[in-house]
Amino acid sequence: MVYGTWRLLDTKPTAQEINHRLHACLEIGITTIDTAEIYGLYEVEKALGAALALSPGLRDKLEIVTKAGIYVPCSYHPERRTAHYNATGARLVKSLEKSLRLLGTDHIDLFLVHRPDWLTRADDTASGLNQLLASGKIRAAGVSNYTASQFDLLNMRMEKPLATNQLEFHLLRDDAMHDGTFHQCEKLGVLPMAWSPLAGGRLFDSKDAAAQRLAVAAQSLGSRYGGATLEQLAYAWILAHPSRPLPVIGTNKLDRLKSAAQADAITLNQEDWYALWEAAQGRRVP
């Protein structure tokens, strides 16, 4: 599993508190930290860097994933007028170098293009990624939110194959199973990453019809898996897919982080996996 930092600053944590959370991740076996240039309106990478600096050697125990390519107007960048994507090679190189500086490291383990840029040729994007790979500033490159055809086009231009495609995937959004992206990952031996694995909290919205059905299903199924909660079953449902998606956990609460990590030990049988799918979709398996 992967610890995601999209909402890292929601609780206004100190560097010491973030440092404690990173150590807690290691204690439960989570060694990969996912972030992005844009997270926290360009503030999360700086906060992570300050936390890492408190423990010499901590960074070497972690795999850091960061992303670039989304640029929005904000107080940090008042010169920007319109939110836009930019996956030109030059822009990606510039963003990555800023990430290295803010995180206080000399390399990123996995660097992702955050969104497809409709105005940039794949050759241009690949030129920047290939440059970063050759320099050693990134150990691997990948993408996020790419279609199978977009992935294939960029991958053809890469000197080293793309390592992942980070996609939204959860019980309430299973497009990746049907649109070819997970099939492509399985074909190429690429492990996808699943962002928003709990549907942004919608799985627990008592007013949501799908959430209501899932709550009933989880109550019925949980006893078969050591009293597993809906949250744990939702992670196990993702982990069961044959493309082997890696859920990106976004909670700031240590108890929920520990609970989520325990889902890695749950192996859903096929009937129970489909039972959760039926509850989420509100219809029988076709």
Image: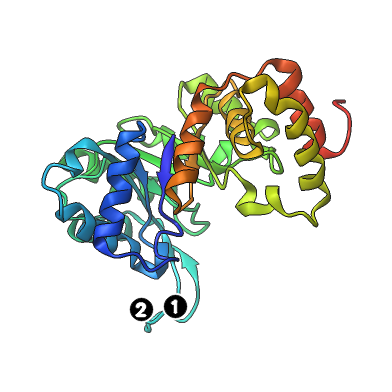
Crowd class of label 2 (few under 14; some 14 to 19; many from 20; radius 10 Å): few
- Whether residues under marks 2 and 1 lie with C-beta atoms below 8 angstroms apart, the answer is yes
Residue 98 position in % (x across, y down): 23, 61
Crowd class of label 1 (few under 14; some 14 to 19; many from 20; radius 10 Å): some
**Residue at 40%, 56% in the rendered image:** 87
Instruction: Identify which amino acid the numbered label 1 is placed on.
Output: Pro
Instruction: Identify which amino acid the numbered label 2 is placed on.
Output: His
**Residue at the extreme left of the image, as rendered:** 56
183 to 88, vertically: above or below? above
Residue 272 position in % (x across, y down): 73, 21
25 with respect to 224 (left or right): left
Residue 119 position in % (x across, y down): 49, 59
Question: Dot 1: what SS?
Answer: loop
**Residue toward you, 272 or 108:** 272
Residue 155 position in % (x across, y down): 42, 34
Question: Dot 2: what SS?
Answer: loop
Quadrant where the C terminus sits is: top right
Pointer 1: what residue?
A: 73
Pointer 2: what residue?
A: 77
106 with respect to 280 (left or right): left
Report the number of discs: 2
**Residue toward you, 226 or 217:** 226
**Residue toward you, 22 or 47:** 22
93 to 33, vertically: above or below? below
